[in-house]
Image: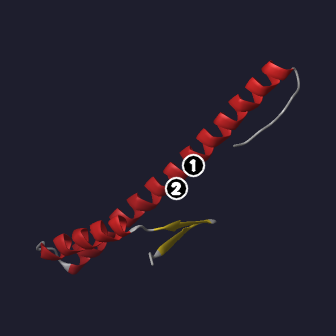
Amino acid sequence: MSEKEQLEFVEFDNPEEYLDTAKELSEYIESLSLTNDQNDKLIDLMLKHNRVARRDAFRQGIEFMLDTASIKSVEDENSTGENITRIN
């Protein structure tokens, strides 16, 4: 079973590939000659970047879905003369 990450009100499943690459990254960072402070800073920056990327991808997905639904609504209205909103 995959681990989950909570991002505000959304919960993401972390597929095996995500967990595998996180482990690979962790092992590589561990092999670098970093002080504990440098290591902690690098990890914090990477986690922050990951959160921002996931939140932005989610936002873009929602905007795409809403735009697609809006286009579909206009197409339905144009073809029938009625205002029908349909989200597939």
> Furthest-front residue in view?
80
- Mark linked to residue 55: 2
Give the quarter of the image for residue 76: top right
Indicate the position of residue 70 as horizontal and vertical percent values: 72, 33
The quadrant in which residue 83 appears is top right
- As displayed, is residue 88 above or below residue 49? above
Which amino acid does the dot numbered 1 rest on?
A: Arg
Q: Position of residue 72 (x, y in %)?
A: 71, 31
66 left or right of 2?
right
Name the residue rendered at 55%, 44% in the picture: 60
In this rendering, position of residue 38 left or right of residue 58: left
Residue with the mark numbered 1: 59
- Say few, some or many: other residues with alpha carbon within 10 Å of mark 2 (under 14 / 14 to 19 / 20 or more): some
Note whether 87 is above or below 58 in the view shown.
above
Question: Quadrant of the image for the N terminus?
Answer: bottom left
- For residue 21, which numbered disc appears in the image? none
